Amino acid sequence: MTESSSNALTDALALEAGANAYLAFWSGLTPLTLDRLDTVVADEIHFKDPFNDVVGREAFRAVLAHMFEKTKNPSTTIVHWGWGGPDLVMVRWRFSADVPILGKWVVEGMSDIRLGADGRVVSHMDHYDAAEQLYARLPGLGGLLGLIRRRMSAGVRPGGTVG
C-alpha cells in the first residue's frame, strides 16, 4: 500500500467514525448528553432548519437547549443514512416530541451533513415540510392552509383518480 492510499484510507475511516459518532449523538440526545456536542461538531458548525440558521458550536448548543426547554420527551430516530459524497452524509430521520398546543408532534425529514477532515460535523442542514408537519396542525392556521392546499391541488388522488 502506498503512503497516498494509506492516507486516503485513514481519512475515510475518520469520516466514517465521525458520521457514526454524530448519528449516535442524535439518537441518544438528552440534556445530559448535550455536553458531548464538542466531540462531534466543529467550532464553526453551520446548522440550518426551517426555524434556525446559526453558525458556531455555542449557537447550535443554544438551539438544542431551546428544544429541550420548549418540548417534552424529544427524540430522534435515524431511519436510514448513506454517503452522498466523500464527506457528505444524507440522513432520513423521524423526530418526535410533546409540544404545547400541538400535543404529540412527529416530523419526518432529511438532513445533509458535511464532515470536516477530522470527522467532526461542519454543516448540518435539515429539510422537512414545516407547512404540512407543523403549521397545518395549528388551530386556525391549519384550516386556512387546508383551504389553500385544496384550491391549489390538481385534484388527483392516490391511484390516479380525479375528484
Image (spheres, rainbow, N blue to C red):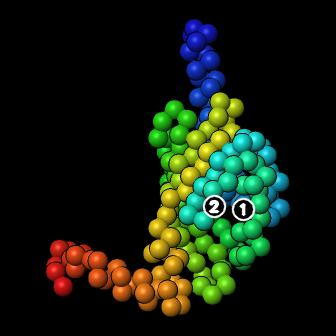
Q: Is residue 62 above or below residue 38?
A: below
Q: Residues within 10 Å of mark 2 (few under 14, many from 20)?
A: few
Say which quarter of the image contains residue 53.
bottom right
Q: Position of residue 136 (x, y in %)?
A: 47, 81
Q: Mark 1 or mark 2: name the one nearer the start of the chain.
A: 2
The type of residue carrying mark 1 is Val
Cβ–Cβ below 8 Å for labels 1 and 2? yes
Q: Residue at x 59, y 22 (%)?
A: 9
In this view, the residue in front, 54 or 99, is: 54
**x and y percentages locating residue 162 in the rendered image:** 16, 80
Q: Label 2 is placed on what type of residue? A: Asn
Residue 130 vs residue 74, the one in the foreground: 130
* Secondary structure of the residue carrying numbered label 1: helix
Identify the image quadrant of residue 105: bottom right
Q: Which residue is mark 2?
A: 52
The residue singled out by tag 1 in the image is 63
